Image (tube, rainbow, N blue to C red):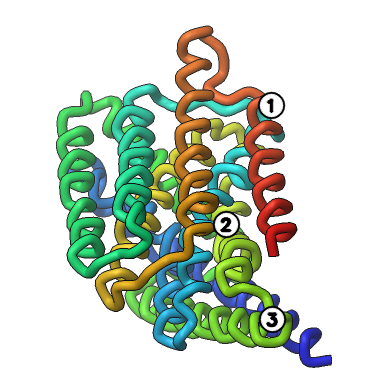
Amino acid sequence: MIISIIILLIALSIVIIWKSSDWLTDSLVPVANRLGTSYIAITTLIVSFILSLPEIFSSVYSYLLGHLDIGLGVVIGSVMANIGLIVGTSAIIKPLTVEKSVVIRDGIFMVVAAGIVLLFGSDLQYSRSEGLVLFLLFIPYAINVWAFEKWRPKKSQKQKVKQVKRSLSLIGSSKFKLKPSLLTFIISALVLIAGSYLFSFSLIKLDEALQLPGILIGLIFGAIGTGIPNIAAAWQGTLKGYKDAAITETFGSNIFTLLITLGIIITLSPFTIQGSVFYFDLTWMIIMNILLIAFIFKGYFYREESLTRYEGVALLLFYLTLLVIHVAMF
């Protein structure tokens, strides 16, 4: 009975997070229109930030409620789910393509960020200074995005503006829309915060009811729950023929999650990790990042799609296998 109520609360909080993410992105479409090509880097970063908000709030709330392991599970699980579940299933729907320059700018940086997280955890503990380093590493990334977009040809900049507005419309593509305004932005942000709190609270209660390791709860329920808006946006974009949507969203979201979300958690409270988290979770997380980039560059080498259906199946099976092994380990 109690577990049924908890599951209902989790489902309700996911719906709240989904809808509030919709409204938040709806309110930002006029901003993208207003900024145009002059501030395309800002709008590009805004999209990545919006995609990562549920993970940020849920992870930080879990920490504040005394369940750091759930928050860490959400971070690691989100990165792996973005690659295995979102990119994998999107590639199965339709083969994906993405600009080589974007892969070099964002994809390589994503792998580097994951590598630094792994390196910092090699002594099985994260210090406050390491959390600050992760947080501050976002600055050179933002500068690189700004410089890259600034020197794009004017025609390419206009295409990028359309792509950003398309990404915003995909995330917020659903019924029950609100008129874009500052009030809509404030209301949707508050609702998203409330939904994330309810989601974190429900995960903690599920952890207590099932007596499972918190990191497992975060890896499975937390990561997939907060990623539902991203999954819906990626699938819609792929079905509409936007073959780069799933990959570009994953790059931006993973960079934010690894540097901003994890950086905040570590800075708030330095912590130690179990050997299994380092040798299994963090190690396989970076392997999945490298595997995605390797598949994409293989596509460039053989002049085919960046990601084929077979590679999408491979990413999905890899992700599902990791989850099964994780469950079996406990």
The spot of residue 45 in percent (x, y) is: 30, 51
Judged from the image, the secondary structure of the residue bearing numbered disc 1 is helix
Point 67% across, 75% down: residue: 212
Is tag 1's residue or tag 3's residue first in the polypeptide sequence?
A: 3
The spot of residue 225 in percent (x, y) is: 61, 66
Is residue 74 toward the left or the right of residue 132 in the image? Answer: right
The spot of residue 272 in percent (x, y) is: 37, 69
Q: Are marks 2 and 1 in contact (CB under 8 Å)?
A: no
Which residue is situated farthest in the top direction here? 302
Is tag 2's residue or tag 1's residue first in the polypeptide sequence?
A: 2
Q: Residues within 10 Å of mark 2 (few under 14, many from 20)?
A: many
Residue underneath mark 1: 309
- Can you say whether 161 is above or below 126 in the image? above
- The type of residue carrying mark 2 is Ser
- The type of residue carrying mark 3 is Gln
Point 15% across, 44% down: residue: 143
Residue underneath mark 3: 211
Residue underneath mark 2: 173
Is tag 2's residue or tag 3's residue first in the polypeptide sequence?
A: 2
Estimate the spatial distance between the alpha carbons at disc 2 and disc 1, rounded to whole Å: 25 Å
* Of residues 119 and 134, the one drawn nearer to the viewer in this rendering: 119
Whether residue 33 is visible to the viewer of this picture, yes or no, is no
- The type of residue carrying mark 1 is Arg
| Quarter the C terminus occupies | bottom right
